[in-house]
């Protein structure tokens, strides 16, 4: 890809992004007023739908009216309506046109489908593309425009008999699908290094090889973009483990015979690559003493930033990236709180874990987490208390009204009149064996505290709530294969920190309602292997979140079989 084309494409994005960035920052000054206006627009636009008629959208004039007339829902409440919409029926939940449905990763149950309406597509384009381009243009060195990004984006979708496509939200947008994957692929290859064979993979394709191979070919990469920081660590670890094979292929213009791809994909890729002996020689010099060093700034000396969901909840991966691969040379742009159902918040700046609610992306209510299922306690963003944790209740542009997102956020302050938040945990991903309500955040704090005390580096961890024996089973994956620490010592240390992380847990252990936890070491790269297997089975790489709490027998069997 010629540098001139790359630069011009990025400059265009930067110019368009600056305008949106300025406009969105203006929105923050009157966040709640704009949020109310959006609600009234949604109700007016959808008043003639079945749902709108049922709950009298046309007669709702205030937020208070809305809260009285329209119930708070979960996905199960509208699942039958979504099924009808999947079959092509219109004007049920939303009047906005759509030809695609986002499908969730089914972490805790069956996959959900969310209509990607034209209005919702505009939200993602505005906040998840243009705003981020503007943020980069305003806050980063202009050097980011001179190269492409190493992006791990992948999109998989299928077509229903109704003609509606179904797939993940991260990379497959309804408007893009209409242009076809080749159109989108050509556009993406101007600003990203990965070819269409990786961004729109067919089943049983080793996309990790393709993404990293094409990224290593380009010395002028200026950034890395991924859905989650856990994916970033996965790809950089792949390079560290396979750099010799990757460099050989770059030198010779070949694809190693052991790479799992179809012959059709192999042939297509070979038409796009050629021998690059000079680049291979540079890479060999960089890795001449192995890969156990921060190689990113040497491999890509122009790299400036990483974008993805990171920060507090992903601090394990943040630490691994900085300590093993990048050092402190890159700026972090932590993505806001985003889900298949919608985009809730956007980044504030560089290296800042907090994000700010996006007032024109959805109408927001907030349920204090201590209120449990008392839905009468929902409040609007103008009534929030800094320092408290709330579950987000969203009315989006997809036909979900007063929808329980299960995303719990800490209110950290305000930007203008719009709240800033920090993602804490998913309210439906807790361990609650004896009413102790242990969150993923509490588990993370306990495990990280124990590993720090033991002087060991954590690669990942999983926890299985053993209801049969009423105890927590911790599965710890260390960075090194041989820790020198026995499981008895590991268990005692985790138990100590678990008591500090959740006092209710300690209380229930002391009263005998819970047994003492146990801990086991996992084999190296267990979680990476789990992720790779799911991808080969057809899951989207963008949606595979870390398995903090083991939720089903399939997960249990996999992880328990890899205990050392």
Image (cartoon, grey):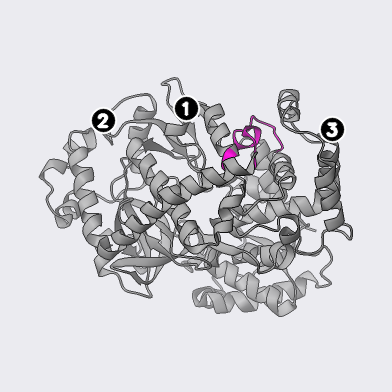
- Tag 2: Cα neighbours inside 10 Å, few (<14), some, or many (≥20)? some
Report the disc number at residue 91: 2
* Above-or-below relation of 54 to 301: above
Residue displayed at 39% across by 56% down = 21
Asked if one can make out residue 232 in the rendered structure from this viewpoint, the answer is yes
Q: Is residue 341 visible?
A: no
Task: Please tell me whether the stretch drawn in magenta is mainly helix, strand or loop.
Answer: loop
Q: Nearer the viewer, mark 2 or mark 1?
A: 1
Question: Tag 1: Cα neighbours inside 10 Å, few (<14), some, or many (≥20)?
Answer: few
Q: Are marks 2 and 1 in contact (CB under 8 Å)?
A: no
Query: Disc 3 on helix, strand or loop?
Result: loop
Residue at the spot x=37%, y=46% of the render? 123
Q: Which mark is residue 257?
A: 3
Label 3 vs label 1, nearer the camera? 1
Locate the C terminus by quadrant.
bottom right
Q: Is residue 185 magenta?
A: no
Residue 243 lies, with reference to residue 538, above or below; the image says below
Q: Position of residue 117 (x, y in %)?
A: 35, 36
Residue span colored magenta: 190-206
Q: Which residue is mark 1?
A: 179
Q: Is residue 370 above or below residue 187?
A: below
Whole-Å distance between the Cαs marked 3 and 1?
33 Å
Which sits earlier in the primary sequence, circle 2 or circle 1?
A: 2
Q: Secondary structure at mark 2?
A: loop
Q: Residue at x 64, y 44 (%)?
A: 554
Residue 196 belongs to magenta span: yes
């Amino acid at each position: 890809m010629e540098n001139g084309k790359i630069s011009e494409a990025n400059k265009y994005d930067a110019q368009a992004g600056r305008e949106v960035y300025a406009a969105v920052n203006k929105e923050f000054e009157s966040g709640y007023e704009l949020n109310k206006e959006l609600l009234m627009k949604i109700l007016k636009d959808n008043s003639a739908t079945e749902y709108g008629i049922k709950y009298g959208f046309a007669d709702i004039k205030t937020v208070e009216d809305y809260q009285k007339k329209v119930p708070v829902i979960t996905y199960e409440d509208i699942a039958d309506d979504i099924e009808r919409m999947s079959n092509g029926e219109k004007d049920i939940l939303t009047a906005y046109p759509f030809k695609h449905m986002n499908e969730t990763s089914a972490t805790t149950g069956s996959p959900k489908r969310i209509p990607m309406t034209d209005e919702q597509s505009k939200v993602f384009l505005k906040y998840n593309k243009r705003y981020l381009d503007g943020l980069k243009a305003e806050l980063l060195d202009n050097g980011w425009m001179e190269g492409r990004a190493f992006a791990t984006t992948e999109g998989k979708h299928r077509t229903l008999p109704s003609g509606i496509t179904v797939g993940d939200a991260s990379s497959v947008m309804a408007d893009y699908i209409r242009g076809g994957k080749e159109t989108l692929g050509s556009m993406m290859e101007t600003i990203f290094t990965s070819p269409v064979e990786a961004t729109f993979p067919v089943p049983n394709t080793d996309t990790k090889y393709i993404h990293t191979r094409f990224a290593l070919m380009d010395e002028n990469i200026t950034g890395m973009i991924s859905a989650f920081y856990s994916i970033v660590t996965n790809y950089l670890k792949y390079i560290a483990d396979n750099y010799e094979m990757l460099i050989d292929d770059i030198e010779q213009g070949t694809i190693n015979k052991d790479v799992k791809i179809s012959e059709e994909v192999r042939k297509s890729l070979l038409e796009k690559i050629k021998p690059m002996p000079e680049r291979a020689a540079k890479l060999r010099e960089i890795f001449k003493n192995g890969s156990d060093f921060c190689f990113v700034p040497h491999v890509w000396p122009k790299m400036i930033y990483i974008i993805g969901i990171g920060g507090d909840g992903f601090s394990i991966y943040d630490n691994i990236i900085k300590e093993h691969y990048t050092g402190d040379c890159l700026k972090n742009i932590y993505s806001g709180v985003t889900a298949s159902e919608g985009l809730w918040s956007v980044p504030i700046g560089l290296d800042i874990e907090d994000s700010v609610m996006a007032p024109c992306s959805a109408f927001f209510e907030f349920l204090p987490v201590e209120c449990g299922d008392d839905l009468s306690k929902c409040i609007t963003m103008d009534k929030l208390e800094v320092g408290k944790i709330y579950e987000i209740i969203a009315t989006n542009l997809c036909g979900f009204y007063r929808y329980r997102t299960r995303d719990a956020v800490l209110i950290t302050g305000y930007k203008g009149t719009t709240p800033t938040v920090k993602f804490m945990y998913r309210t439906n991903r807790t361990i609650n064996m004896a009413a102790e309500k242990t969150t993923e955040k509490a588990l993370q704090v306990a495990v990280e505290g124990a590993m720090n005390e033991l002087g060991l580096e954590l690669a990942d961890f999983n926890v299985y709530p053993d209801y049969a024996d009423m105890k927590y089973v911790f599965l710890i994956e260390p960075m090194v294969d041989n820790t020198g620490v026995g499981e008895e010592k590991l268990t005692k240390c985790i138990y100590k920190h678990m008591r500090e992380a959740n006092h209710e847990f300690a209380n229930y252990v002391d009263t005998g309602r819970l047994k003492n936890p146990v801990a086991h070491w996992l084999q190296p790269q267990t979680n990476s292997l789990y992720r790779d297997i799911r991808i080969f089975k057809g899951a989207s790489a963008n949606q595979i979140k870390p398995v903090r709490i083991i939720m089903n027998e399939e997960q249990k069997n996999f992880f328990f079989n890899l205990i050392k």
